[in-house]
Image: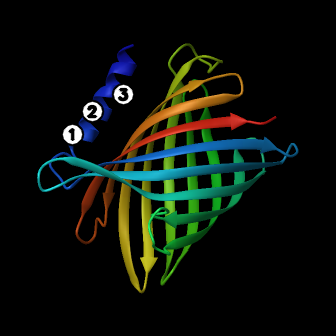
Amino acid sequence: MRLVFIIFLLAHNIASLAQNRETQFVWEAETAADYKISSSWSTNTSIGKRSIWYSEENSSLSGELRFIEVNQFATYKVNIDTKVSFGYKYRKTEPFESTDEREHRTTQQISTTHYDRALRLASRLRTEQRFRNDSFEHRYRYRIAGDLPLSGQELNTREFYVTVTEEILLSYESGDHAWDNRLGVVLGYTLRKAKVQFGITYRLEDLNRNTNDFVFISTGAYLSLN
């Protein structure tokens, strides 16, 4: 219980950093399904959305749907600790408005588990190519994550777990570059062939230029089809 208190205290402090700004918070929701093709290959399909809440001049809070997206990943298990993945994302901005803003994104990724006991520590190195209507952006992302069950030494069905992540992101577009940083905390709950998650991420964007910060609230449902 002490650890749960610490996690929620951290989440509260992260959220408080973004108060009194025009954009108050961002909500991302995702539903994903995994399917194991063989002992080495698996796929992941997901759909998601992002909504933004911001303050009006009269101090009222308004929200809008920023985009919807579909993701498809294929993953190859190199060994017990290492996986290689390839992905494609299609994103439609403001889907209910008369805009034609779209994004196609390709992803290459390698993930490695460094330590796998009650506390699991893992790294993810990802490269992305973002093709939008009138621009192209290349990104490099490194994330380290630690997760552990909140009951006992192993994660079992109908138990809670917590994950803390730190990610550094470097993007290149039109000869310019930008650094971002993302610190997140996630509380999850396992079911027999599924898990649900609630998370808060504090994002610092354009660290080397005009820095902006945002709080992202995330919810997710993740299913196993095998």
Q: Mark 2 falls on what kind of element? A: helix
Say which mark, if any, is on residue 7. Answer: 3
- Is residue 129 visible in this depiction of the protein? no
Q: CA distance from mark 3 to mark 1?
A: 14 Å
Q: At 27% from the left edge and 33% from the top edge, which residue is drawn? A: 12
Q: Position of residue 226 (x, y in %)?
A: 82, 34
Residue assigned mark 1: 16
Residue assigned mark 2: 12
- Is residue 134 visible in this depiction of the protein? yes
Nearest to viewer (mark 2 / mark 3): 2
Q: Do labels 2 and 1 touch, CB within 8 Å? A: yes
Q: At 53% from the left edge and 65% from the top edge, which residue is drawn? A: 92
Q: Position of residue 151 (x, y in %)?
A: 53, 14
Describe residue 61's horizontal placement relative to residue 99 as left or right. Answer: left
Question: Is residue 2 positioned above or below 181 on the image?
Answer: above
Q: CA distance from mark 2 to mark 1?
A: 6 Å
Describe residue 23's horizontal placement relative to residue 203 as left or right. Answer: left
Q: Amino acid at mark 1?
A: Ser
Q: Position of residue 214 (x, y in %)?
A: 30, 52
Question: Is residue 222 positioned above or below 20 on the image?
Answer: above
Mark earlier in primary sequence (3, 1): 3
Nearest to viewer (mark 3 / mark 1): 1
Q: At 11% from the left edge and 52% from the top edge, which residue is drawn? A: 58
Q: Mark 1 falls on what kind of element? A: helix
Q: Position of residue 24 (x, y in %)?
A: 25, 48
Question: Is residue 102 positioned above or below 223 on the image?
Answer: below
